[in-house]
Amino acid sequence: MVVAFVVAHAWENRIQAPREYSNECSICHHGGHGQVSEIAPIFGRVGPIAQTPAGHHYLVDVLLYGLDGSITAGGAHYNNSMPSFHRLSDDEIARILTFVASQEMPSGAPTFTAADIAAGRAHPMSATDVLQERQKLDLQTPVQ
């Protein structure tokens, strides 16, 4: 019975995640590939960033609190604002991040859990604070 529940839950997440991504993220991120000089691409970038604990934490903060300011991503410069998605549930954010992390990553894509998101909510920040977190992370492990 427990195995059936776990399999059913995993299947439900697999179906929900692309729909949630499409509803919440795809329009701005242009299907995950971004728009030159406007919106940074996320497919193929989020998974590698999330491979480290600091990168994983940073990505949770981006979804919860937004990101405001100038960044470099994929070798291009962007100066835009990403809104906060704190209104979404912990499960929704975890599914979206896991889905995006798995795109264009052949294997070993990191996963996010509702507990990861709940932990991020415990330490509120501003979108500018998230930019500073990115800048510090970029000094340790380039966030490209």
Image: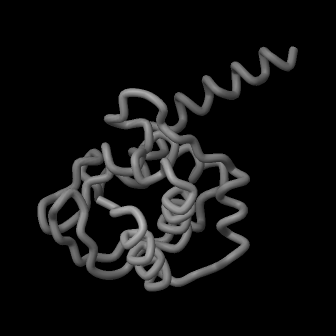
Extreme residue in the front direction: 140
Residue 24, horizontal then vertical, whole percent: 43, 54
Identity of the residue drawn at 49% across and 59% down:
55
Q: How many marks?
A: 0
Give the quarter of the image for residue 57.
Answer: bottom right
Query: Outermost residue toward the left?
Result: 36
Q: Vertical placement of 69 versus 62: above or below?
A: below
- In the rendered image, residue 61, in percent from the top left (x then y), is placed at 54, 68
Quick one: quadrant of the N terminus?
top right
In the depicted structure, whether residue 130 falls above or below residue 51: below
> Is 98 located above or below residue 144 in the figure?
above
Q: Position of residue 48 (x, y in %)?
A: 40, 47
- Quarter holding residue 53: bottom right
Residue drawn at x 39%, y 62% is 141
Residue furthest out toward the right: 1
State how the image is colored. Answer: one colour
What x and y, as percent, mark residue 90?
66, 55
Residue at point 51%, 53% (across, down) = 52
The residue at 67%/55% (across/down) is: 116
Q: Nearer the viewer, residue 26 or 56?
A: 56
Q: As drawn, is 94 to the left or to the right of 96?
A: right
Compared to residue 128, the image places residue 66 above or below, namely: above
**85 on left or right of 25:** right
Q: Quadrant of the C terminus?
A: bottom left
56 and 24: which is toward the camera: 56
